[in-house]
Amino acid sequence: MTEDLVVDVETLREQVREKYREVAVAPHAEYHFHAGRPLARKLGYDAAVVDALPDPAVESFAGVGNPFSLRTIVPGERVVDVGSGAGFDSFVAAAFVGADGRVVGIDMTAAMLAKSRSTATQMGHTHVEFREGFAEALPVEDGWADVVISNGVINLCADKRAVFGELNRVLRPGGILQFADIANGRPVPPEALRDIDLWTG
Amino acid sequence: MLEDAGFTDVQIGPPVDTFAGATGEEKAHAYEVFGYAFLARKPERD
């Protein structure tokens, strides 16, 4: 289902990579969105969980909502975090699943992967890992996940049908998709949809 | 689109003005862009 894509997939990916490389290496610069601990507080994350995380796990957080607000992750669950960035939501999920659970974060931005892997090592987490990949082709076996989470990522993907197909594929039957993303109340003009700069801010 | 992909029991949380106070606020408000939490289930059987 690629015939109705309004932007070039690879061009969009390159612009998203560059934007989030900046967020990884310069988390305190000014962006068109909020980031870090103030954003986590604004979105209503569990303060005890967030306060326990080291700064590198939180400072590059740039989500748009709270994927844990409608359902809490259960201890022992296997979680996939699509577009894990510097790992914030993965580390929050890791706190919920505990040592008997597993969290796999997936991201396409090298700087974010380096940061999340370094933080996991710093935290001594052996039940969290980060893999390189695209939301449209997740490096996860069929039916592995009890839960898929994501935060502010699907809106940045040109082929949303492919993404939702992948989320469905990696979930076990009866599995849960809980994510946060943006939606617009007013229609965006076609010329704006084709303006790739607007996709990344 | 969630239901088209095979998900059921879709729930949507209240809107969050996620860009309020950020430099992207004006553009977000122009198109009434808000953040939402979504919850959905993959059926036990397809």
Image (spheres, grey):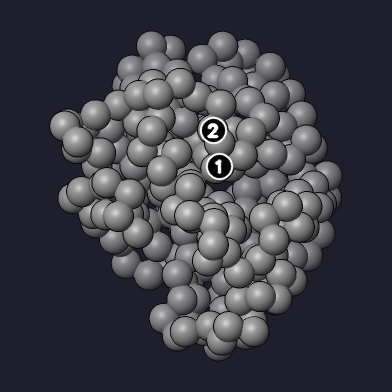
Q: Across the whole image, how many numbered discs are drawn on residues? A: 2
In the rendered view, would you say A67 is above or below A95?
A: below
Instruction: Give neighbour class at mark 2: few <14, some 14-19, many 20+ (Cα, 10 Å).
Output: many
| Mark 2 residue element | loop
Image location (x, y in percent) of residue B6: 27, 46
Task: Give, as a three-letter code, the residue at label 2.
Answer: Leu
- Residue A125 visible, this orientation: yes
From the image, tell me which residue sits under label 2. Answer: A138
| Mark 1 residue element | loop
Residue at 59% from the left image edge and 58% from the top image edge: A158
- What quarter of the picture does the C terminus of chain A occupy? bottom right
In the rendered view, would you say A82 is above or below A95?
A: below
Image location (x, y in percent) of residue A112: 73, 38
Query: CA separation, marks 2 and 1?
Result: 6 Å
Q: Which mark is residue A53?
A: none
Residue at 24% from the left image edge and 29% from the top image edge: A173
Image location (x, y in percent) of residue A144: 39, 21
- Residue A28 visible, this orientation: no
From the image, tell me which residue sits under label 1. Answer: A135
Q: Residue furthest front?
A: A3
Task: Give, as a three-letter code, the residue at label 1.
Answer: Ala
User: Is residue A93 toward the left or the right of residue A105 in the image?
Assistant: left
Q: Are marks 2 and 1 in contact (CB under 8 Å)?
A: yes
Closest to the observer, A1 or A26: A1
The chain letter for the residue carrying disc 1 is A
